[in-house]
Image (cartoon, helix red, strand yellow):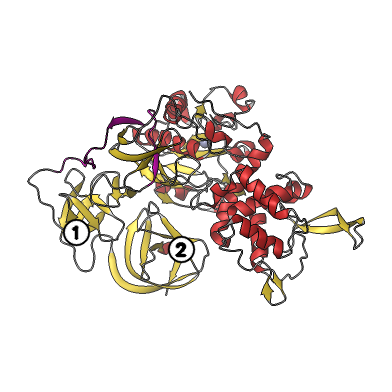
């Protein structure tokens, strides 16, 4: 028995770090400045968000309206300001008080972005003050560059930043996809303009709603895409269980008729019947549970609670590992989420908690101390996955970013165990938690690979060409077999071109996204690939203009594919198009990947 060691810390400080880390991560993807450095500077300079400027002006870094060398491109609106008394020192070190104007921001993400604009753009004569900071991956070197540029006079500034980074394990936010990401269960994205920007409270509630209509995921998104409706949600679940992202999880949606609730709740609109009791399909219900598990895991929660009592719930202060269910009917004269779901919320809480239990021994709440799971010692060998969605992580703990999800309940070979129950996948795809809560030990890995694969019909020969996918979700694998890691999954039942067959029924996708099992249990042969492409695909190159700065390049044609970074503004040649998830995707001639053409202008 190992007892997890908890460090008692102020919730306020911890909450601030949990809020700021993901925002610094988001900034890092644009600015190239280490999230750990930004987060440490924010903690130090705003007193964990407690200074007058932080509280009243969302200004974490004491940025004045007028800054020397004001030539850099700022995201501040140039108008909003906050005036306060501030202490200065004269050349003799004597303090005196002046009144100064400071920048006021709509939210703290804008404060972080503006600060990074300053660090990347400030000039000293004709050279950059903080040359080399963007892209520096060593936090101590980054801190030294900031100090050397004249940012702070405190001789201990570098050490202070480094010790904050170590104390709060802030390097976890330097990893790609780290922090308060959106759920990997998202199938499509229809962003709504109706939200308040960054949350002012960390996530500790989930509020499921009923849409009142058996809508698709895209249609739920479409309900909120106009600013006229003044409403939104973080996620929607369509009648077939597909998930739409409407408002980024890090932002406050307008969903539950309560500012206080929505600042801390992830809100989920679920497709339902149009009248009492607003029943939902089984696909919606099961996906709601899976989504709640995912939201809890990514937010460091090991329990989902349902009290079924308004006053008790709203007066309850959740522990750091607890997530609480709330309902719209407590905040407005509505029956939302309908009696069908309301009567099942106890079941939702129990099933989510069961899937979460044993995952971390409670240790994640204290910052990556993934203690022992429940029973015993885990050893290398073969493990059968028993849950429908087991995250693959980049390292042995929930504090590492995810690399994908195992959804096939297959058997996997583990070559190394660390931190109790974390097992390294032989495929190289990453680490999974082989705790008995999720997996069963099958035996030692003698002779290697396991093939479960869905029983390829003997005697059937598969050939290249086009295949129609017939199942709701078909894994894309990195190689021709279930022993390879997943690269995502196909969820649109679309027609795909296969250029090579291996190991019986494994087909290589023309897109380069990976391999799928074209066994007739999953797919139907749709004929030879016409040279001009098939189905919704077409070839023939053309040029598009990208004029937004946050357009992702994806590894394949869909939001279910991994990101390859942002597509810089400019003109690009598209050599192939494909429809998926409501978007038309264009393959970049450069080979960098795919972009959603809806966000570009065809030339
Ligand atoms: Zn509602």
Residue linked to disc 1: 500
What residue is shown with label 2? Answer: 599
Q: Nearer the viewer, residue 528 or 554?
A: 554
N-terminal of the pair, mark 1 or mark 2, is: 1
- Residue 184, horizontal then vertical, whole percent: 42, 46
Q: Regarding mark 2 in the picture, which secondary structure is present there?
A: helix
> For the point 22% across and 52% down, which residue is it?
468
Residue 192 tag number: none
Residue 380 to residue 530: above or below: above
Q: Main secondary structure of the magenta part?
A: loop
Does 240 sit left or right of 294 as displayed? left
Q: Magenta segment range?
A: 430-456
Circle 1/circle 2 CB separation < 8 Å: no
Q: Position of residue 357 (x, y in %)?
A: 45, 28
Badge 2 residue CB within 8 Å of ligand 1:
no
Can residue 517 be seen by looking at this rendering? yes
The residue lying furthest to the bottom in this view is 126
Residue at left 35%, top 58%? Answer: 556
Going 48% across and 44% down the picture, which residue do you hit? 400
Question: Eyeballing the image, is 342 above or below 471?
Answer: above
Instruction: Name above or below for residue 222 compared with residue 14.
Output: below
Point out residue 359 in the picture as x, y percentages from the top left corner: 45, 32
| Mark in front: 1 vs 2 | 1
Where does the image place residue 87, in percent across and percent down from the top left?
A: 87, 54
Q: Does ligand 1 reach within 8 Å of label 1's beta carbon?
A: no
Asked whether, in this view, residue 6 is left or right of residue 122, the answer is left
- Measuring 59% from the left and 59% from the top, which residue is drawn there? 33
Q: Is 429 on the left-hand or right-hand side of 31?
A: left
């Amino acid at each position: 028995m190992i007892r997890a060691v908890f460090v008692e810390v102020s919730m306020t400080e911890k909450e601030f770090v949990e809020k700021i880390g993901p925002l610094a991560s988001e900034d890092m993807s644009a600015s190239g400045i280490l999230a750990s450095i930004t987060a440490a500077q924010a903690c130090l300079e705003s007193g964990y968000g407690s200074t007058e400027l932080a509280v009243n002006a969302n200004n974490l870094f004491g940025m004045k309206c007028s800054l020397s060398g004001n030539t850099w491109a700022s995201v501040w609106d140039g108008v909003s300001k906050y005036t306060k008394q501030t202490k200065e020192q004269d050349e003799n070190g004597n303090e005196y008080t002046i009144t100064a104007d400071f920048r006021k921001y709509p939210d703290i993400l804008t404060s972080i972005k503006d600060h990074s604009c300053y660090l990347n753009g400030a000039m000293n004569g004709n050279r950059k003050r903080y040359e080399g900071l963007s892209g520096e991956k060593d936090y101590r070197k980054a801190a030294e560059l900031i100090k050397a540029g004249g940012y702070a006079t405190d001789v201990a500034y570098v050490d202070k930043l480094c010790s904050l980074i170590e104390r709060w394990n802030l390097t976890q936010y330097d990893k790609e996809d780290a922090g308060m990401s959106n759920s990997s269960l998202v199938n499509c994205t229809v962003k709504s303009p109706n939200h308040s920007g960054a949350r002012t409270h960390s996530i500790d509630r989930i509020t499921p709603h009923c849409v009142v209509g058996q809508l698709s995921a895209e249609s739920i998104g479409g309900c909120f895409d106009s600013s006229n409706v003044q409403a939104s949600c973080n996620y929607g679940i369509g009648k077939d269980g597909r998930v739409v992202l409407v408002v980024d999880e890090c932002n406050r949606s307008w969903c539950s008729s309560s500012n206080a609730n929505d600042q801390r709740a992830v809100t989920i609109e679920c497709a339902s019947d149009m009248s009492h009791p607003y029943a939902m399909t089984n696909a919606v219900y099961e996906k709601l549970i899976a989504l709640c598990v995912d939201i809890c895991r990514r937010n460091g929660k090991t329990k989902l609670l349902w009290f079924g009592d308004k006053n008790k719930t709203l007066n309850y202060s959740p522990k750091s590992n607890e997530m609480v269910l709330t309902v719209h009917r407590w905040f407005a004269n509505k029956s939302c989420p309908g009696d069908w779901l309301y009567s099942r919320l106890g079941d939702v809480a129990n099933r989510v908690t069961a899937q979460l239990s044993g995952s971390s021994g409670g240790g994640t709440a204290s910052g990556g101390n993934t203690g022992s799971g429940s029973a015993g010692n885990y050893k290398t060998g073969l493990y059968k996955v028993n849950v429908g969605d087991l995250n693959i992580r980049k390292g042995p703990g929930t504090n590492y970013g995810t690399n994908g999800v195992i959804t096939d309940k297959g058997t996997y070979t583990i070559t190394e165990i660390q931190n109790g129950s974390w097992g390294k996948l032989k495929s190289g795809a990453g680490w999974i938690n082989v705790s008995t809560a999720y997996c069963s030990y099958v035996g030692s890995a003698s002779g290697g690979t396991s093939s479960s694969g869905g029983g390829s019909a003997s005697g059937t020969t598969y050939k290249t060409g086009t295949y129609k996918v017939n199942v709701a979700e078909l894994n894309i694998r990195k190689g021709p077999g279930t022993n390879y890691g997943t690269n995502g999954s196909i969820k649109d039942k679309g027609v795909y071109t296969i250029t090579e067959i291996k190991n019986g029924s494994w087909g290589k996708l023309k897109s380069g996204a990976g391999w799928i099992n074209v066994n007739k249990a999953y797919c139907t042969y749709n004929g030879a690939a016409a040279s001009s492409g098939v189905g919704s695909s077409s070839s023939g190159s053309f040029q598009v203009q990208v004029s937004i700065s946050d357009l992702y390049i994806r590894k394949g044609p869909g939001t279910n594919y991994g990101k390859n970074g942002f597509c810089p503004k400019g003109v690009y040649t598209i050599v192939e198009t494909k429809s998926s998830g409501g978007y038309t995707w264009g393959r970049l001639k450069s080979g960098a990947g795919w972009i959603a053409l809806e966000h570009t202008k065809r030339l």
